[in-house]
Image (spheres, rainbow, N blue to C red):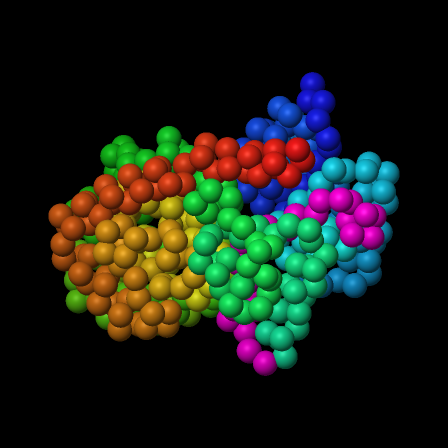
Amino acid sequence: MASGERICFVVSSPMTAQAFLSGHIAALAKHHPVDLVVNAPAQSAVGDIQTQARIVSVPIRRKIEPLTDLAALLKLYALFRRERYAAVSSVTPKAGMLAMLAAALARVPRRIHIFTGQVWATRTGWQRWLLKLADRMMVRLATHVLADSPSQRDFMVAEGIVAAAKVSVPGNGSICGVDGDRFRPDAGRRAAIRAEHGIPGSACVFLYLGRLNRDKGMPDLADAFAQLDCQDAWLLVVGPDEERMQDEMQARIGASRDRCRFVGYTDRPEDYMAAADVFCLPSYREGFGMVVIEAASAGIPAVASRIYGVTDAVEEGVTGLLHRPGDVAGIAREMTLMAGDASRRIEMGRAARERALGLFSRSAVTNAWVRFFGQLLA
């Protein structure tokens, strides 16, 4: 039984908890009692975390809902006052604002928020101003601020969100690290996924895996693929369609749509990465680009935007190619280069896996988090 001071993590989504925090909670639970506050009425929603931490359900929604948000704030305040945590740590914007405010009001001595990207990075006008103000408020309420990549840290400092002395990056970056055993080259899975979707074994498959929306550059990817003059190039798009992008992308792709496959949400991303040759991320904003590292671990080079977060995940010219966000011609040019040079893809893929496991392994990132909390609570 852990006998150290009690720690509380706060997130809105069970999926966020499982994806980002499961390894950290398991490691920290060896030394400290850990609670997880999450919007999950059923404890089973958080998977194996329920065996490592006490689960407390609070209705923290991603969207702004004033009455629900106020109820969540009051529940968090009451919980923090009752439990007297040594530290409260939050991830994602809504959970962060509510948790940091409630923890400050409850006088929790150590309040940590982890930034994984900035929603306002692609906004303009009053929306950008308001969202930046919210981040600044969250930073003021926190006693410690973490960023999941060095370039995101530098971006936040340059934008006046946080002072350089207050923000740090655990290890080399990444909020959770990559599991090299799960994400690895696999000829069997490669053949099976290609056969399932009618993709030839000899094809060069470009993969996008993630949420389908405009911030991720989906229209740009479709336009770039439409420009490819390569009958061996296929596009595999995997992930939940948040903004009804599939119909628009198919229309943009036009005559090449027969070589494009759309797959919805999957809980087996490693299967699709094993089936691909190049990972595409034409995003306009990322905190770190974790999916790029997972693809790298699977031996797949990237064609990605040259933006903060992604520049930490891709070593340009070594593990992938970078382009300006929104540069459709640049994306098409890099996809054409990759499609026409199998030896380069293989060489970059090997370098990508070596770098991913060397800098961003799950064990290394978890150890960095354990060190951070160990020093914080010493």
Query: Looking at the rendering, which quadrant does residue 191 occupy?
Result: top left
Determine the image quadrant of residue 222.
Answer: bottom left
**339 vs 250, nearest the viewer:** 339
Q: In this view, does 247 lie to the left or right of 42?
A: left
The answer to whether residue 108 is magenta is yes
Q: Which residue lies furthest to the bottom in this view?
A: 125
Horizontal and vertical percent for residue 259? 26, 58
Q: 151 above or below 3?
A: below
Instruction: Tell me the residue at 39%/53% (across/down).
Output: 312
Residue 41 location (% of width, % of height): 73, 40
Q: Toward which corner of the image does residue 118 lie, by quadrant?
A: bottom right
User: On the rendered structure, is 149 left or right of 29?
Assistant: left
Image position, residue 194 (x, y; %): 28, 44
Q: Which residue is drawn at 72% across and 22% down?
A: 3
Tell which of 227 and 161 is nearer to you. Answer: 161
Q: Is residue 47 left or right of residue 226?
A: right
Q: What's the residue at 19%, 45% (across, down)?
A: 346
In the rendered image, which quarter contains the C terminus?
Answer: top right
- Frontmost residue, 258 versus 172: 172
User: Is 24 located above or below residue 208 in the figure?
Assistant: above
Location of the N terminus by quadrant is top right
**Total of numbered circles in the picture?**
0
Which span is picked out in magenta?
A: 103-125
- In reply to whether residue 138 is colored magenta, the answer given is no
Closer to us: 103 or 346: 103
